[in-house]
Image (cartoon, rainbow, N blue to C red):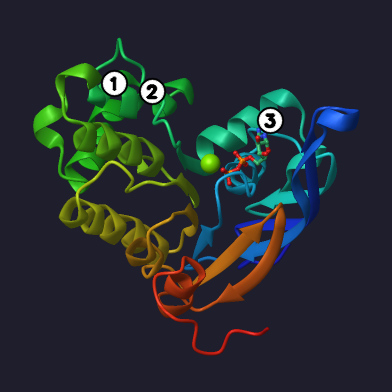
Amino acid sequence: MTARHDLLRLDDVHRGYGEGEARVVALDGVSLAVAPGELVAVMGASGAGKSTLLHVSGGLDVPDRGAVTVDGLDLGGLDRTRLAAVRRRAVGYVFQDLNLVSTLTLAENVALPLELDGLRRGPAREQAVAALTEVGVQAGADRFPDEVSGGQRQRAAIARALVGPRRLLLADEPTGALDSVTGEDVMAVLRGRVDAGAGGLLVTHDPRTAAWADRVVFLRDGRLVDSTAPTTDAAAFLGLAPAVDAEP
Ligand code: ADP
Ligand code: MG
C-alpha cells in the first residue's frame, strides 16, 4: 500500500437485483478511482445505477463481482464487524433520503457515529456542534429534525457525514432540498474537505453542483459511458446546452 493510495477504487464492479425475467443489472462492470483531493460527480438518468454505485462504494451493498477498495482496504476481505467499522470511521455518507433519526436532536444525530465508535458524550457533542457550525445550522443543534426546515435537515445530514476523520465522502443529491445559495455554501464545505485531503463521490442532477467537481462521470444502464471536465459537458449531457464536440 502506498502512502497516497486512492481513497476509493472500484474494479469491474457488477451488481444486479432479482432473478430471471425480473433481473435488473444496476452496475455492469464499473471501474473508477477517486484520489485524495479529488471530487468526482456522477450524473445519469433515474435508474442508471447512481445510488447503487454509492452504496457499494460505502460498503452498504456488496457487489456480485469485482472489487471495492476504500482507503487501501479491500472491502471484500472484511467480516461484518470490520466492514461496519470502516463505514463509521472512513466513510461519510449523505443519503438521498437523509436518514436522520427523528427522536434525536440534530447535534445527537451528528454525534451518533462518534459515540458508536467509542467517543465520550462531551467530546462527541463538541465535534458535532463544530460540524453543524461548519454547515451553518448551529442554531438548530438542540432541535429535533421535524422542528427545522428541510434545508436545515439536509445540512445536518451533511454535518453527520463530515464529522470525525472521514476521508471518503459519498453524497447522493446533497443539494437537492436546498435553495441555490445554501446549496453553494454546502458545496463549498464539501469542496474544502476534499481540498484538505478527502476524496468525494457526488451524485447530482444539477450542472451547477457538478461544476464543483474535478471531473464528471456519466452512468447509463449501469455502465460508465463518459468522463469529462465539469460544467459545459454536464450541461450538454442533460440537454441544457448544445454539445460542442459530441461524437455521433
Ligand atoms: P439511480 O440512483 O441512478 O436512480 P439506482 O442505483 O437506485 O439508480 O437503481 C438502478 C437500478 O437497480 C434500477 O433499475 C432500480 O430499480 C434497481 N434497484 C436498485 N436497488 C434495488 C433493490 N434493492 N432491489 C431491486 N432493484 C433495485
Ligand atoms: Mg438514486
Callout 3 crowding tier (Cα within 10 Å): few <14, some 14–19, many ≥20: few
The residue labelled by disc 2 is 112
- Ligand 2 within 8 Å of disc 1? The answer is no
Q: Nearer the viewer, residue 95 or 106?
A: 95
Percent x, y of residue 78: 77, 34
> 241 or 52: nearer the eye?
241
The nearer-to-camera label among 1 and 3 is 1
Task: Determine the CA span between mark 3 and mark 2.
Answer: 18 Å
Query: What's the mark number on residue 82?
Result: 3
What amino acid is labelled 3 in the image?
A: Arg
Q: Position of residue 243 (x, y in %)?
A: 49, 82
Would you place residue 202 above or below residue 108 in this image?
below
Q: Residues within 10 Å of mark 1 (few under 14, many from 20)?
A: many
Mark 3, secondary structure of its residue: helix
- Residue 146, picture quadrant: top left
Residue at image location 60% in from the left, 37% down from the top: 86
C-alpha gap between disc 1 and disc 3: 24 Å
| Relative height, residue 18 to residue 15 (above, below) | above
Q: Is residue 78 left or right of residue 114?
A: right
**Label 1 belongs to which residue?**
108
Point out the tag, 1 or 3, that comes first from the N-terminus: 3
Q: Amino acid at mark 2?
A: Leu
Figure quadrant of the C terminus? bottom right
Instruction: Give x and y (percent) for residue 161.
Output: 40, 40
